[in-house]
Amino acid sequence: MSHSVNTSLSTKRSFWFFIGPAFLVSVGYMDPGNWATSLEAGSRYGYDLLWVITLASLIAILMQLLSAKLGIATGKNLAQMIRQQHPGNGGTLLLSSAAIAMVATDLAEFLGVAIALNLLFDIPLVVGIFLTIFDVLLILWLERFGFRWVEMTIMAFVVTIGLGYVVELWLAEPQWAEVISAMAIPNATILDTTALFIAMGILGATVMPHNLYLHSHQVISRREGNGDVKEVRQRFYKMMKWDTVIALVGAWLVNSAILIMASAAFHEQGLLITDIDEAYKTLGPLLGDAAALTFAIALLASGIASSTTGTLAGQIVFESFFKKRPLNILKIRLYIRLATMFPAALAILMSAKPLSLLVLSQVVLSMQLPFAVIPLVRMTSNPHLMGDLTNDLKTKVTAWSATAVIVALNLWLLIMLTIDALKAV
């Protein structure tokens, strides 16, 4: 979808008109990849890595605000702007990196749905992988009634996941004083190679490249052509700020709840959880069947919802490779889902451990982050592109600092893994 830069938005719209784009994005912050990293982090290190989720969530809110701002100011999504600003091989490289991120995202989402179906209905993982193609048919069917129907469906899934973890925390009875302290105060646990690997997974599972592309695209759905441009764009961005902060604070709470539950239920019992199905099977004896059932239902809601948003983000990125759309939207989405399904199916056929594969997929996402974040910060700091919505000095300093943290953690992880590999030789 493309709009001219001069498109503006009605100043008479209600607050609720603007709610939706960020909630669509927030699903990516509580997808099965988050479950994998937070379950292992909580069961292995207790509450020690909670501050990493807080830091990652703050960076995520900042980057999603920049993503929304880019869509509001330019009328184009991040993929389209990368193609516009880097028309040669540089743009192709950046978008190819984004395509890799889409595959890693779908890997986590497919596995999440397949594992949940297996836990709830004893459906084999491989069969569950292929059953998830029906979520595409559901997307295409719902869109015939307007995209707001898709947004409302996703928001219903978000509420289901959130309520699921309210139940889980009530049953797990965590140490709340320790939780609050661990959320805000960093500790040296991250210096351990395994902890750093998991922390990078948390970062990759929280600040996800596909969400930056998706958010910049979805805010365009709220643009309309009336009113003074500057006045309207400022109000539009203000409303999108509320949408983003509310949705992502909710995602931060769910993310934290997964780790808190894992710490209270598993770490305090001396149990290390290395698979999602192991978490499900262990919750029953520890906290009762209701806890296990709630866990599986929330996981299913998470997988289906994030598969939906992953499909939409994949379409945005893959379409950017074409100057003209070669196929209609329905076929493109179907082909993208088919193409991204095979890595997950192949991994399961090769008997990869689901949780390890999920954590690895999140580390891959983290490694792809600089290729999305750096162009985003650079473009939103360009007054020729952004006009009155250009990043101010404080935002520039904060955004580039967050980008530096992401790049530094990536380099740190590469160095640590290289050292470990050399020691093993």
Image: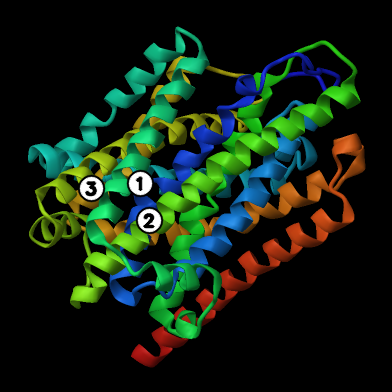
**To which residue does mark 3 refer?**
295
The residue sitting at 26% across, 52% down in the picture is: 168
Disc 2 packing (10 Å; few <14; some 14–19; many ≥20): many
The answer to which of 111 and 229 lies nearer the viewer is: 229
**To which residue does mark 2 refer?**
257
**Residue 111 placement, left or right of 53:** left
The answer to which of 306 and 4 lies nearer the viewer is: 306
Residue 80 locus on image (x, y percent): 69, 32
Residue 373 locus on image (x, y percent): 67, 53
**To which residue does mark 1 refer?**
107
**Residue 339 visible at all:** no
Q: Earlier in the sequence, mark 3 or mark 1?
A: 1
Name which residue type carries label 3: Phe
Quadrant (top left/top right/bottom left/bottom right) for the N terminus: top right
**Residue 223 visible at all:** yes
Disc 3 packing (10 Å; few <14; some 14–19; many ≥20): many
* Count of numbered marks: 3
195, above or below 188, in the image: above
Name which residue type carries label 2: Ala
Name which residue type carries label 1: Leu
The answer to which of 132 and 235 lies nearer the viewer is: 235
Give how far apart the Cα atoms at labels 3 and 1 are. 20 Å
The residue sitting at 33% across, 47% down in the picture is: 166
